[in-house]
Structure formats: C-alpha cells, structure tokens
Image (cartoon, rainbow, N blue to C red):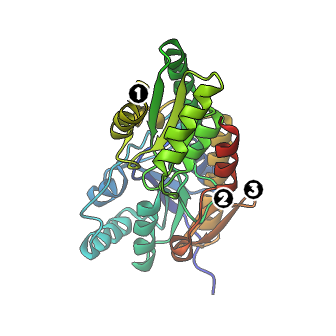
Amino acid sequence: MAEKKQRTIGVLTSGGDAPGMNAAIRAVVRSALTKGMKVYGIRRGYNGLLDGDMYDMGIRSVSEIIHRGGTILYTARSAEFNTPEGVQEARKMCERKGIQGLVTIGGDGTFRGARDLCEAGVPCIGIPGTIDNDISCSEYTIGFDTALNTAMQMVDKLRDTAMSHDRCSVVEVMGRHAGYMALNIGVACGALAIVVPEKPLDFEREIVEKMFYTQSTGKRHFIIVVAEGCAGGANDLAKKITEATGIEARATILGHVQRGGSPTLRDRVTATEMGFRAVDLLEAGVGNRVVVVKNGLITDIGITEGLEMSKQIDFDLLNMSEKISI
C-alpha cells in the first residue's frame, strides 16, 4: 500500500556550505508550493530541527537567492542529533510541527542523519551539496564546479607572482579526504605535480627530478597543487622543496574562500533539478532516498545503499597530467 502523500515538508542544509545550496532550496520551495504543500525552512541544520527553529516559506521567500553563495537557511553540525535520543527528539519535533517529510541538503553526515530519521519514521530525501565532490553514490555534487572555478582563478593569479620571482608556488586546496578538487584544479592550471590522498607521493621522482628536468628545458617557475592533509600540508611541502632543490618555494592555503561566491551555471541548474526531483519523491510518498547524478542524468538511490558505495578519482586524468606537465 502506497504511503500517504506529503502535505507539509521541511528543508534544511547541514554540514559545510556549498554554492548552489540556495538554488536547491529555491527549487524545493517553489515546486512544493505549486503542489499545494506547506514548506518549513529549518535554520542551522539538525540543530534547528531539534530547537524548532523554522519558519513558513512562501514563494517570495526564495526570490533573488539563486545567484547567491552560502545558504539562506544557515548550516551547522549537531552533536546532539548524532545520538539515538537526539533522533527521537527530532522525530517528535516533526510530529509537533506536522512535518511529514524532509529534504536534507549536505554531505555524508547529512545523509546518515537523514537515514536515521527515516528509520524513526520521518521520510527524508537527501541532496548532495558539498564542494569536495566526495559523495560516492553521485557523480557530481552541488558546489563542486563553483569551487573549482574559484580556486582555478586564484592559482592563475599566483602564477603571475611565481613567474616574476622564478619561484615554486605550492597551493593547498580543500577536499577533506578526497583528491577530486586537487586533481581537476591541477590539470586546469597546468601544475607540475598534483598531490592527492589516493596516490602516494614519490617526492624525488614526481617533484625534485621533474623540477630539475623542466629547468633544463627553460622553465623557471612552478605550480604544485596539493590536497589538504597530504604530504604534511603545503607549508611542509614547500619547505621540503626549497631544501631539496634550492628553488624558493612559497605555500598558499586557499582555505574557505573556495566555499564562497556566486554559483556557476552548472551548479545552479543541477541544484534546481535535484530540488525538483526531491519534492517529486516526497509527493509520491517515497523516502530514504538520495537524489544523484548517474551517467549524467538526475536520478535517485537508497540512502543506505548510497552510503555503502565508493568511487575513485580519475587516475587516467592524473596519469595524463603527469605526462604533459613538463
């Protein structure tokens, strides 16, 4: 027997913010309202759900946000929610507010919370929003393209000063435990070396010998892109390069600037499609799903199945970069 169709839903953003989250919120609210639903905007993720910090969202509440970075609903991580007692309190809050389904926008932690709420009886649909692109069940996550373009532009600017000083610029980018950002930024910027957690670094071969070889062909400045947490970080790697080669190496940690900025066309469109799909699923009485990109198309998958999946960076792309970055 089909589940009862949703009439009141909530939407929240959780974990790290990502450009395009606002576009997803807009799509959820507008598509739900056109289906006759009531929509609560829940502030500060699962913390706001526990506290009842939410408001009734109307059509105009999401005007002029599609182009804005960050999230108008704010975001946070909740230690209290990550307990069985916290999940039950969240369920009770949904009952008190009449919320019959949730759209949760974020990463793996957000989806684990959504899975727990589903098991407690609250249907949830997850939307992958993280600049790291490290959600295994989806080929693409909201915010990835914007973050790549932001970082690429900054590395291009660093190249100017590296050229002026015959210097090596070691640039640390975000990515948590995944090298998707570092790989794509490194390829786009023609980095001499790309250091990612998925592949051990051969410092002598991949950096020292390569720098000396390219010097012999006339190159005088170098860009190296490193994923956060790799090789001891950009500062340690820069110091090691200077000591091993005699070439001045300077570290730049791009940090949270990569999270901000107006989302690109790809992120706005993908977020809009995902938000629309999420509401369709809730309307049909479906929960415990994640909206994903598979083979370039928007579809959905079970949350538990999605959390158990894994994916790898494009090693062919990494190998190609190593061959042509000389």
Sort mark 1 into few (<14), some (14-19) or many (20+) by Cα contacts within 10 Å.
Answer: few
Q: Local crowd at mark 2 within 10 Å, few (<14), some, or many (≥20)? A: many
Q: Is residue 298 left or right of residue 220?
A: right
Amino acid at pointer 3:
Gly
Q: Residue furthest front?
A: 216
Residue at left 32%, top 67%? 90
Residue designated by label 2: 277
Type of amino acid at the residue the image marks with label 1: Gly
**From the image, which quarter does the C terminus lie in?**
top right
Asked if the residues shown at circle 3 and circle 1 are in contact, with their CB atoms under 8 angstroms apart, the answer is no
Q: In which quadrant is the N terminus drawn?
A: bottom right
| Residue 260 position within the rendered picture, expressed as x and y whole percent measured from the top left | 47, 33
**Image quarter for residue 138?**
bottom right
Label number found at residue 296: 3
x and y percent of residue 117 in the render?
A: 41, 72
Q: Is residue 195 visible?
A: yes
Question: In the image, 218: left or right of 108?
Answer: right
Image x and y of residue 229, in percent = 38, 49
The picture places residue 191, in percent across and down from the top left corner, at 59, 35
The secondary structure type at the circle numbered 3 is loop
Q: Earlier in the sequence, mark 2 or mark 3?
A: 2
Q: Nearer the viewer, mark 3 or mark 1?
A: 1
| Depicted 124 relative to depicted 146: above or below | below
Of the numbered discs 3 and 1, the one sitting upstream in the chain is 1
Residue 83: give its label.
Answer: none
Q: Which residue is mark 1?
A: 246
